[in-house]
């Protein structure tokens, strides 16, 4: 595989509703920003780009089949090669990885990845219904299909297994909303308190409205390239472009119906799922004890797909101790609870320790006042952008949005793009993005690193 | 022979909303159109599918007859309460086995909001049920518990399945009550 770089990215404003633009108009907004940032105009870029990948989740929301080609057409990318990808909430993450594959394989030197979702054309309850059609429509949807309900069931199990509390969940909400206060792209820029989170209307017990991401309209785009492609783009741009390389990708899957997920043994966990930082005697003893207490893996409290995606990406990028070797993470926090579950899947802490890890302070940004007493200093900020909970979740754009925000972090240009340097992770060298679908059905993890 | 009269017009009243006036510049200057607020229209959309349960059909036939059948792999014994024609580990065909639908609550939630189709039923309780002899779980409704009394204590409580008297051929043909 060839080295693959991200050289530019753009994100449209995410909002509850963008009636000012159709989905192609939002993609154009993100694309134009992407080109402007490297000082290239469309006709020049068109001569250099080899093809594109389009990302959007739901034909129901769009009420338009083959919407991908409409964006391709509107951007002026025809007749270049393109295809649409779809994988639920992970659609954007898959898109970025498909762009990576196109370049890494040698098929393309320059590839544009773009994604969008326009969810505001239906009311929220109808949107919930559309999203719930991404659960099994034979056995799950008819019982009361509602994704917040599915995730709330996972939370109750996590709470019983590990003693996780709603206050620990609320810490995630406070962190991400306050981070987003400094991000002009975000949909919800709010200085919340734990009390605000807990007193918000209950949606699916114990998750309140402030534990759950919102529906959004938005788009994002990124340019991926090989070394040859980079040389061509630099020539067109007239300047040296920053080197941010995708050093590892990983993907995992799990059962569509979360009820069908297995309850594996300790031995199978260690055979198939454990990370390098879980191989010590101490870690084995910890997990042996969990199994003795009745823990089974992944059950409904853990995302095996997220673990497998992390494992593969870390292997490819040479990461053996994620908390120490990753400078920040943008992960798929559709729910506060899923951020906590994902800490564990990504090996930032052990399974069962996600709750205390969320309140430890390790995942917060330095220099930002959260109004919380945090025992430890930040180690690896998680969702410095504000994540899905605060930025919004226009599904097909979300994974790409994470990619662009991570790219800007590694470029050191958060201040330029956000108009506020508060969210810049200082001296960030390696960032990881995590994109997640369904009840944990498709998950992608991608590792990005800057090269000075 | 007289020429047949064929209308050259669409009748305005035949296709839904009739619009009498949309603001638009009266002169030649169209530059202000870039500032125009967007037009939003309502587009109804409804479909009736002829949906086949395929290899899962016996599961629904059993529910309609007040019986609960699960999918068991004859070689390994691995058992799924959800209908599943083939085992995910061996790839071989499963067989139908009848069990008594009694088990324990593995996880739950109370939905105070939901998809449009279920809004009239809010708040409703979802549970994942553990059955003795099954390796995986089963999603169902819990009926008869107080939605305002949600508590982690519910996890582990015994539940018993009940069948709708008149089947609707949905997985909700079975629901669960707490066993005192």
Image (cartoon, grey):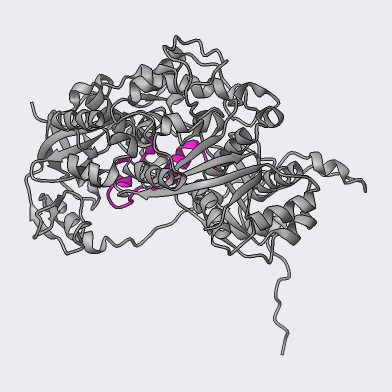
User: Where in the figure is residue A271, as x and y percent of width and height?
Assistant: 23, 46
Q: Find residue A79 and report its image quarter.
A: bottom right
Q: Which residues are magenta?
A: A119-148
Looking at the rendered structure, the number of numbered marks drawn on it comes to 0
Is A111 on the left or on the right of A130, as rendered?
Answer: right
Residue at the limit of the structure toward the bottom, as seen here: B1
Is A278 on the left or on the right of A334, as rendered?
Answer: left
**Viewer-proximal residue, A27 or A98?**
A98
**Viewer-proximal residue, A283 or B138?**
A283
For the C terminus of chain B, the image quarter is top left
Taking the spot 58% from the left edge, 34% from the top edge, the residue there is: A16
User: Where in the figure is residue B71, as x and y percent of width and height?
Assistant: 15, 55
For the N terminus of chain B, the image quarter is bottom right
User: Where in the figure is residue A76, as x and y percent of width and height?
Assistant: 73, 58
Taking the spot 71% from the left edge, 42% from the top edge, the residue there is: B38
Could you tell me if residue A183 is visible in this image?
Answer: yes
User: Where in the figure is residue A405, as x and y percent of width and height?
Assistant: 59, 36
Is A440 on the left or on the right of A55, as rendered?
Answer: left
**Residue A70 highlighted magenta (yes or no):** no
In the depicted structure, whether residue A83 falls above or below residue A24:
below
**Viewer-proximal residue, B55 or A281?**
A281
In the depicted structure, whether residue A259 falls above or below residue A50:
above
In the depicted structure, whether residue A117 falls above or below residue A107:
above
Taking the spot 29% from the left edge, 62% from the top edge, the residue there is: B52
Q: Find residue B155 and report its image quarter.
A: top left
Q: Find residue A318 and report its image quarter.
A: top left
Is B85 on the left or on the right of A51, as rendered?
Answer: left
**Viewer-proximal residue, A442 or A433?**
A433
Could you tell me if residue A41 is visible in this image?
Answer: no
């Amino acid at each position: 595989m060839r080295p693959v770089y991200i050289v530019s990215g753009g994100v449209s404003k995410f909002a509850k509703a963008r009636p000012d633009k159709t989905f192609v108009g939002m993609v154009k907004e993100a694309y134009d920003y992407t080109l402007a940032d490297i000082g290239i105009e469309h006709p020049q870029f068109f001569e250099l780009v080899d093809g594109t990948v389009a990302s959007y989740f739901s034909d129901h929301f769009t009420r338009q089949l083959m919407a991908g080609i409409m964006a391709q057409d509107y951007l002026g990318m025809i007749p270049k090669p393109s295809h649409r990808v779809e994988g639920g909430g992970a659609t954007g993450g898959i898109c970025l990885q498909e762009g990576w594959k196109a370049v890494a394989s040698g098929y393309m030197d320059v590839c544009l990845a773009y994604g969008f979702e326009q969810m505001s054309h239906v009311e929220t309850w109808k949107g919930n219904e559309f999203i719930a059609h991404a659960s099994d429509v034979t056995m799950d949807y008819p019982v009361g299909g509602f994704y917040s309900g599915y995730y709330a069931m996972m939370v109750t199990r996590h709470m019983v297994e590990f003693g996780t509390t709603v206050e620990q969940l609320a810490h995630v909400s406070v962190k991400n909303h306050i981070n987003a206060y400094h991000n002009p792209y975000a949909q919800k820029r709010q200085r919340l308190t734990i009390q605000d989170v807990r007193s918000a209307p209950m949606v699916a017990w114990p998750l309140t409205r402030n534990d759950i991401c919102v529906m959004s309209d938005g788009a994002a785009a990124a340019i991926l390239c090989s070394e040859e492609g980079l040389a061509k783009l630099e020539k067109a741009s007239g300047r040296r472009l920053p080197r941010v390389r995708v050093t590892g990708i990983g993907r995992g899957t799990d059962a569509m119906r979360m009820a069908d997920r297995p309850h594996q043994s300790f031995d199978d966990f260690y055979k198939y799922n454990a990370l390098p930082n879980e191989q010590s005697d101490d870690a084995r003893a910890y997990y042996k004890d969990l199994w003795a207490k009745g823990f089974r893996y992944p059950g409904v409290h853990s995302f095996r797909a997220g673990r497998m995606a992390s494992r593969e990406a870390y292997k490819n990028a040479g990461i053996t101790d994620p908390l120490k070797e990753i400078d920040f993470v943008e992960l798929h926090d559709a729910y506060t609870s899923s951020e906590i579950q994902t800490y564990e899947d990504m090996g930032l802490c052990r399974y069962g320790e996600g709750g205390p890890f969320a309140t430890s302070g390790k995942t917060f940004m330095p220099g930002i006042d959260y109004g919380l007493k945090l025992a430890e200093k930040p180690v690896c900020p998680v969702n410095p952008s504000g994540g899905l909970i605060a930025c919004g979740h226009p599904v097909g754009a979300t994974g790409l949005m994470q990619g662009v925000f991570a790219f800007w972090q590694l470029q050191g240009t958060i201040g330029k793009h956000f108009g506020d340097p508060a969210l810049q992770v200082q001296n960030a060298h390696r960032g990881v993005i995590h994109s997640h679908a369904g009840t944990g059905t498709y998950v992608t993890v991608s590792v990005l690193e800057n090269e000075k | 022979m007289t020429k047949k009269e064929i209308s050259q017009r669409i009748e305005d009243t035949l296709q839904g909303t009739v619009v009498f006036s949309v603001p638009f510049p009266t002169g030649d200057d169209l530059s202000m159109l870039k500032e125009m607020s967007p037009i939003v229209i309502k587009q109804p959309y409804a479909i009736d599918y002829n949906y086949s349960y395929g290899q899962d059909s016996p599961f629904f036939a059993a529910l309609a007859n007040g019986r609960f059948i699960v999918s068991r792999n004859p070689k390994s014994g691995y058992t799924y309460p959800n209908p599943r024609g083939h085992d995910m580990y061996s790839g071989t065909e499963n067989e139908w086995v009848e069990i008594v639908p009694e088990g324990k609550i593995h996880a739950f939630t109370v939905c105070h909001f939901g998809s449009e189709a279920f809004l009239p039923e809010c708040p409703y309780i979802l549970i994942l049920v553990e059955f003795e002899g099954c390796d995986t779980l089963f999603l169902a409704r819990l009926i008869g518990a107080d939605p305002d009394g949600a508590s982690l204590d519910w996890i582990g409580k015994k539940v018993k399945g009940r069948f709708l008297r008149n089947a609707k051929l949905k997985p909700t043909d079975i629901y669960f009550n707490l066993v005192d």
